[in-house]
Image: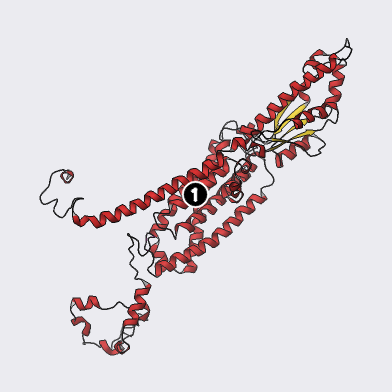
Amino acid sequence: MLDIYSWRHLPGKDDGRVGFADPRLRPELKRRLRHYAELAVICTLLIWAGLSLFLGAMYKRSVMAHNLNIHVIDLDGGSVGASIAQMVLSAKPTPTEPTWQRGPRLRSLDEVKAWVLRHGWGALVINDGATRRLEDTLLGGAGYDPTGAMTIIHSSGRHVISEMLFVSPALAATAQRVSRQYALDLVTAFQRQRPQPQTNYAALAHPVGFTSVDVAPAGFSIAPIMSTFGFLLVIFCTVGVLIPWKMTTFPFFAKVRYRDLVPMWFALLLCLALILSLYQALAFVAFRGPDYTKLALRYTAASFFKLWFTSAGVAFAVGLWLFSLFLPLTPSTMALPSVITVVTNVVSTVTVVELAPTFYRIFYALPFYNGSAIALRVVTGAHREAGREAGILGGEIAAMTVVLALSVWARQICVLRGVSDPLGWYRGQSYFNTPISYYKSDAAAAAAVPAGHARRPDDDEEGQADPRAAHAPEERSAQPRYPASSVRIVDYAGDNARLTTGNLGG
């Protein structure tokens, strides 16, 4: 059996086979090489589109950090609060660090925490009573805790990667800088005054410090990749199903009514999204990690269903979009929308709009971006209420349903008119092959039939042979093809069979 792979000529087994040097193979080789050249061009577009979209959103992050705003909030109202706020706001801004702004007027630390949780990246808070406690200690008090002077408030659940790279380091570095600067200024001012015997020199050397509070902790193990990898895997599985659906459903478009096709595809895509997203939600339950309960919100049954349906909404929106594009595209070009869709959605969860060029404001309309914001809201409590993101996802699903209806209509028209074949190739392309005749050829054939040669119902009475049966095969093959719309089925009255009702012996 393996001798067919021999390099030698095998009499009887190599008969009919040709080599690449055979002239009869040259037309096919030219056709293949032309197609491979087209594939090379498509692959070039794919790789550059994917790399440009992903790296283009990432390469300027370090010099666009100034687009992130962090705030200094003075709850003290005394000299300590005024001095520290002035130090923070007077620092020279740089493109590589978040921009400091004066925060809103709030009355308590709890209000600041609630504000950061919903709206802010982070804040440096000068706590209420910082001036009074420091003055009392310098005049002879004991038991002073300098870390009670300032509080750093950040929200890692807002965006784990960006907060870890830019916000937390900037808050900590600024707090340390103003602590040293305020201590130096206080010592300098103390040297100009007459020293008091009851002065607390420990408080003089270290007058202010800080503590850190994460109002939306997302430090558990899988937090940075929770939504990105989960959504990505769901979409990969979705694409793996959509491609066979496109390649194997030609009979549906040829035989099934349009008003039945659209609900069928809608229901199939919805079921696929629900099944795959259920697996993602179950995987999160299994692998969220032992430190989840300490570093995130309590996980409940409601959390499970919220994550499940959020993932289902993302998968459904992307599935509707991709299948709507797959239907009219050829097999060679189906990868292009897949790469562009997947890369843009993935990068929207890896970085944030503030750290990307202006073009990437499209993030706000992407399913991954909105789904990730909802997931972080469920798990950590960060962000505003998830109504806006859920509304955008719902709007995307509605819009993609309309696009799917148009795509199904276009695909069915092309199939029924003989313009597109089962795999999606179009008439005129190298691999086009469809069992349905071309609609223009049918129209031309119908127009070529003489009016006087119309067939009468009594031409084929019982015992009378069809005169066309005596024609030579060459003549029969040369006869024009008739479109199905011009063929009439007429029952012969001399027998007892009815073609229209199926009655026998009637």
Residue 305 appears in the figure: no
Q: Is residue 44 above or below residue 257?
A: above
Instruction: Name the residue tied to disc 1.
Output: 340
Residue pushed farthest top? 197
Q: Closer to the camera, 104 or 486? A: 104
Colour scheme used in the picture?
secondary structure
Residue pushed farthest left? 11
Residue 155 appears in the figure: yes
Amino acid type assigned to the residue bearing label 1 in the image:
Ile
Magenta stretch in the rendered image: 418-424
Where disc 1 sits, the SS reads helix
Quarter that holds the C terminus: bottom left
Q: Quadrant of residue 454?
A: bottom left
> Secondary structure of the magenta portion, mostly?
loop
Q: Residue at x 37, y 61 (%)?
A: 422
User: Which percent across, then down, holds residue 269?
Assistant: 50, 56
Q: Closer to the camera, 404 or 178? A: 178
Q: Is residue 13 left or right of residue 409?
A: left
Task: Examine the structure image and report whether residue 397 is included in the region drawn in magenta.
Answer: no
Q: Closer to the camera, 287 or 245? A: 245
Q: Is residue 106 above or below residue 424?
A: above
